[in-house]
Amino acid sequence: MKELKKTSLFEAHKRYGAKMIDFSGWVLPLQYEGITAEHEAVRNFAGLFDVSHMGEVEVKGNEAFDFVQNLITNDASILEDHQVIYTLMCYPYGGVVDDLLVYKFTNKHFYLVINASNVEKDFNWMKQNLGNYDVELTNISDNVSEMAIQGPNAEKILQKLTDTDLSTIKFFYCKKDVKVAGANCLISRTGYTGEDGFEIYLSHEDAETVWDKLLKVGKEFGLKPAGLGARDTLRFEATLPLYGNELSENITPLEAGLGFFVKLDKQNFIGKEALLKQKEEGLKRKIVGFEMIDRGIPRHGYDVIADGRNIGFVTTGYSAITVKKNIGLAMVDIEYAKLGTPIEIKVRKKNLKAKVISKKFYTKNYKK
Amino acid sequence: MKILEGLYYSKDHEWIKVDEGKAYIGITDYAQKALGEIVYVEMPEIDDELNVGDVFGVIESVKAASDSYTPVSGKVIEINEELEDSPQLLNENPYESWIFVIEMRDKSELENLMSSEEYEEFLKTESH
């Protein structure tokens, strides 16, 4: 078996009683106290996540902007310095290489945050598309620790450890060289739970100290360490897509309902032609939300049935914690995508009744 | 990890309590902890004929669905309907919350199960 990678917070997780699992080659906490308690802490107070497994690629050079603009579906030209956008990288045929955050420091310096399971693939993809751009790409994934503090109390808690006025960091903006408990950090007001909060990038040496101090000062504000389990239930309720579930090389961003992040009026980017064509011809399938009517919990990969035939598959399903319903997301043939359409989910041997509902399972609570 | 004396245990972490040819079947404290928060229990149906090793149902935690296996053969004569609305009882009281009752077909099958002491030893080899 391949040796699992440990984050700089591995020892801290053990101290906090985490149940550790193998995730994309990393040993990471699934949960500490329990997924429900951690999920609710993030919705009502705050949660602290170790997301050091995420990958980071630095893009530097005279043509950094042009390179990034060609690589992604979203429009980097609208970005101010120190602004961040969510975007996708596509193959020429429209399938998704990965979803990512693009941090713009200047036109000559960007920072791309990519999924742990895709780091190698993504980095190769970027190198493959480097062409003659005057750009230097560096995969700094192994040099960076990352944690996320998420929830309505996130700002109050983090503010205790820094002199930087966090209220000046707006939603989807970042700030470099912020001192948190003395450690030098890159901080962005971003996250993956549907709540307000910050992502903190720092060196491995400082990670455990900052982690411990945050949990200490955050205690009175209800801060709890939270694992991958809660991260997934939270992001699912907030309808944030997950690579490998709602997104893959076989799913286009338009089918995933992420057309907002695909700027087809932009001059050019990899995949534009295919996506333009798909839009003109009309989608044949798309991701919808659904709710179980019969008792049973839908899970990733289950078949979706209607009119006695297979019309799609579940991309994510849960007994949702805040929403308190058995709900899911599914890729279905377009004629079954309308709200209210009766469908069935094949839960093991039985076809259970469900219906298509709005994907807005939970109203996001961002501080804009 | 709580282990009760006087019960039989399977390698799949079920406990079995025998009462005059009837076997009450539930999951152990170890199993409930390993599964995490249980949100749904799919139980067998009354009159189902089950053999050792058959999947009798599915226990779903927040995270995933896990098959559960029949530790002794026979006919299902009762299911614990309370678990339909309160699956979390398996977390709270694993040894009070039997899932279903089987009318045993072959009592000699009990010999293949573990005593509490043997199960305790077995758990030591399972944990790593």
Image: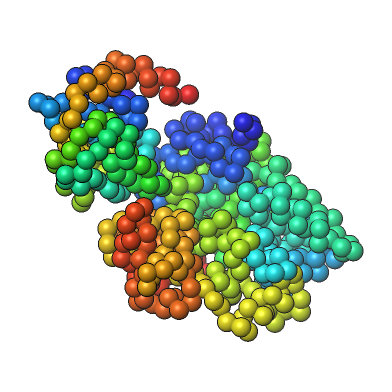
From the viewer's side, name the closer residue of A270 and A113.
Answer: A270
Residue A41: x and y in percent read: 39, 50
- Which image quadrant is residue A202 in? top right
Q: Is residue A283 left or right of residue B104?
A: right
From the viewer's side, name the closer residue of B92 and A308.
Answer: A308
- Which image quadrant is residue B71 in? top left
Question: Residue lying farthest bottom?
Answer: A280
Q: Is residue A335 left or right of residue A284?
A: left
* Label total for image: 0
Depicted A206 relative to depicted A241: above or below? above
On the question of residue A237 being in view, the answer is no
Question: Residue lying farthest left?
Answer: B20
Residue A147: x and y in percent read: 57, 47
Q: Is residue A270 left or right of residue A353?
A: right
Depicted A275 relative to depicted B66: above or below? below
On the question of residue A318 being in view, the answer is yes
From the viewer's side, name the closer residue of A364 and A303.
Answer: A303
Q: Residue at x 75, y 53 (%)?
A: A123
Q: Residue at x 40, y 47 (%)?
A: B64
Is the N terminus of chain A in the top left, top right, bottom left or bottom right quadrant? top right
Q: Residue at x 37, y 62 (%)?
A: A345
Residue A117: x and y in percent read: 62, 48
Residue A303: x and y in percent read: 43, 60
Depicted A156 relative to depicted A213: above or below? below
